[in-house]
Image (spheres, rainbow, N blue to C red):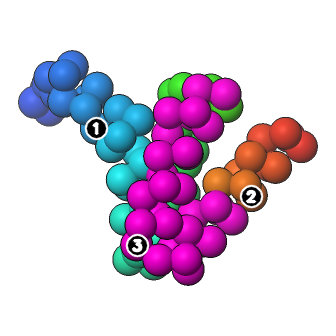
């Protein structure tokens, strides 16, 4: 049986670091790639929990998005808010 190449732990840690997830969320908004943006938000909630994700990922994503444009900030803020509301309701 063939196995895939093992992925070094530090690469996994980097791919899902708060900074990487914030960048993924904003990149998704800028490129209108809702799957990428959604994936970054969901990963942040699942990996870090709601409070840490808000502090370490979402606040950074909102700041970064605001640096691009008000529209980008609005898209990111609404997507994060929508996911937060869903997690509270569910």
Disc 2 to disc 1, C-alpha distance: 24 Å
- On the question of residue 34 being in view, the answer is no
What residue appears at the point 40 percent right and 44 percent down from the top-left corner?
21
Residue 78, given in percent of the width and then of the height, sits at 69, 65
Quarter of the picture containing the C terminus is top right
Q: Residue at x 78, y 41 (%)?
A: 87
Name the spot of residue 65 as percent of width and height, x first: 46, 64
Drawn side of residue 59 relative to residue 86, left or right: left
Helix, strand or loop at label 1? It is: helix
Is 62 part of what is drawn in magenta? yes
Range of magenta residues: 51-79
Residue 22 in percent (x, y) is at 42, 48
Label 2 Cα neighbours within 10 Å, binned few <14 / some 14-19 / many ≥20: few
Q: Which mark is residue 68?
A: 3
Residue 52 picture quarter: top right
Which mark's residue is nearer the viewer, 3 or 1? 3
Task: Kindly check if marks 2 and 3 are in contact, taking CB atoms under 8 A apart as contact.
Answer: no
Q: Secondary structure at mark 2?
A: helix
Which quarter of the figure is the N terminus placed in?
Answer: top left
> Which badge, 2 or 1, comes first in the chain's sequence?
1
Residue 82's disc is: 2
């Amino acid at each position: 049986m063939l196995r895939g190449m093992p992925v070094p732990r530090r690469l996994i840690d980097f791919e899902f670091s708060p900074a990487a997830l914030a960048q993924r969320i904003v990149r998704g908004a800028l490129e209108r790639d809702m799957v990428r943006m959604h994936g970054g938000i969901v990963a942040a909630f699942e990996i870090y929990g709601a409070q840490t994700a808000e502090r370490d990922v979402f606040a950074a994503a909102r700041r970064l998005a605001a640096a691009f444009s008000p529209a980008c900030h609005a898209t990111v803020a609404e997507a994060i808010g929508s996911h937060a509301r869903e997690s509270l309701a569910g």
